[in-house]
Image (cartoon, rainbow, N blue to C red):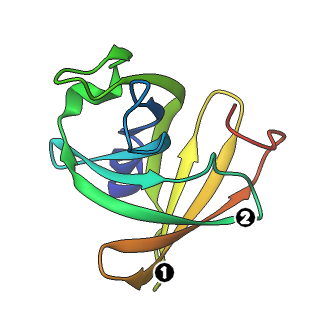
Amino acid sequence: MNPETEQLELRFVLLFHQYVPGDERKDHWDLMLEHEGKLLTWALAENPKPGKSILAKALDDHRIEYLQLEGEISHDRGSVSRVISGKYHWKLNTVRHVAVLKTDDSIWEVEFSPFGGDSVRVSVSSASNLSTFS
């Protein structure tokens, strides 16, 4: 098998997580990347846009079912709606951690830079015609 072709089979999703009214937690976007049967997950305080750097907090890995999940979440944790989803692969031959996200009509590069503790800076650049995931 060609490793680069195999990498393209990995899936990602960007979900908007909205909490129930009155909850002290803030709404955010969850970026989830498929990895070894689970989803590596980061909470982003803002909707990612090309040219913008966003602080993201690493969350516990999520179940693979979140790739298809929309609607209410159990235990009064609010609801999620899919913003965008598609395939991704890690950019090869780089010392940086860069994921290339692909949908039917866009290609984005997302760079993860350590920021301290369980936080990273997520920088997005666009290689296509979309200016934001909306």
Residue 2: percent from left, percent from top? 34, 52
The residue labelled by disc 2 is 52
Marks 1/2 in contact by CB < 8 Å: the verdict is no
Rendered image quadrant of residue 100: bottom right
Circle 1 crowding by C-alpha within 10 Å: few under 14, some 14–19, many from 20: few
In front here: 62 or 103?
62
Q: Does residue 2 appear to the left or right of 85 in the view shown?
A: left
Q: Is residue 69 above or below residue 134?
A: above
Q: Is residue 79 above or below residue 118?
A: above
In front here: 22 or 124?
22
Quarter of the figure that contains the C terminus: top right
Three-letter amino acid code of the residue under disc 2: Lys
Q: Which mark is residue 96?
A: 1
Query: Which residue: 33% across, 19% down?
Result: 69
* Badge 1 or badge 2: first in the primary sequence: 2
Three-letter amino acid code of the residue under disc 1: Arg
